[in-house]
Image: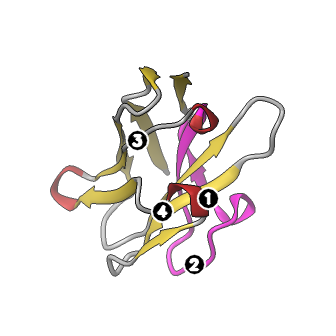
Amino acid sequence: QVQLVESGGGLVQAGGSLRLSCAASGRTFGPYGMAWFRQAPGKEREFVAALTWSGVEIYGIDSVKGRFTISKDNAKNTVYLEMNNLKPEDTAVYYCAKPPRGSGTWTADDMEYWGKGTLVTVSS
């Protein structure tokens, strides 16, 4: 089993920044990929970004490219999502997720473990 705990959400004005963290514990040995998803009120959960087990960054939403950066601290088993120049449309609950080992796809259905999410609210 793997446990994922997100933190770092909050209320921020448009143009501001936040850094989300996701701490993984449990059976996390070996290289593994991690992802961030988000779900806005009334909308489906969408893929935001992933970091593959080999360190490749993947961004799933064009509007976050250049503003969001995913990274990982292997020593701390923690993945981060640095979010800059935030916009009101970034308001959502942000979830971190871990796919099964060896998986190379990044849809919500492909994830094996989920955190409970952290709320990000961007005011205009």
Q: Nearer the viewer, mark 4 or mark 1?
A: 4
Structural distance between the alpha carbons of marks 1 and 2: 10 Å
Q: Are marks 3 and 4 in contact (CB under 8 Å)?
A: no
Structural distance between the alpha carbons of marks 3 and 4: 11 Å
- How far across and down, in percent of the image, does residue 124 sit? 55, 22
The quadrant where residue 89 appears = top right
Q: Which mark is residue 103?
A: 2
- Rendered residue at 31%/65% (across/down): 29
The residue carrying mark 4 is: 65
Image: magenta residue range: 91-115
Q: Which mark is residue 85?
A: 3
Within 10 angstroms of label 3, few (less than 14), some, or many (20 or more) residues? some
Task: Please say which color scheme the image uses.
Answer: secondary structure
The residue carrying mark 1 is: 112
> From the viewer's perspective, is 19 left or right of 99?
left
Structural distance between the alpha carbons of marks 2 and 3: 31 Å
Label 2 vs 4, first from the N-terminus: 4
- Rendered residue at 59%/64% (across/down): 62
Amino acid carrying mark 1 in the image: Glu
Within 10 angstroms of label 4, few (less than 14), some, or many (20 or more) residues? few
Q: Are marks 1 and 2 in contact (CB under 8 Å)?
A: yes
In the current view of this chain or complex, which residue is farthest to the right? 42
- How far across and down, in percent of the image, does residue 82 sit? 34, 47
Amino acid carrying mark 4 in the image: Lys
Residue sitting nearer the eye, 114 or 120: 120
Check residue 103 for magenta coloring.
yes
Q: Are marks 3 and 1 in contact (CB under 8 Å)?
A: no
Structural distance between the alpha carbons of marks 2 and 4: 23 Å
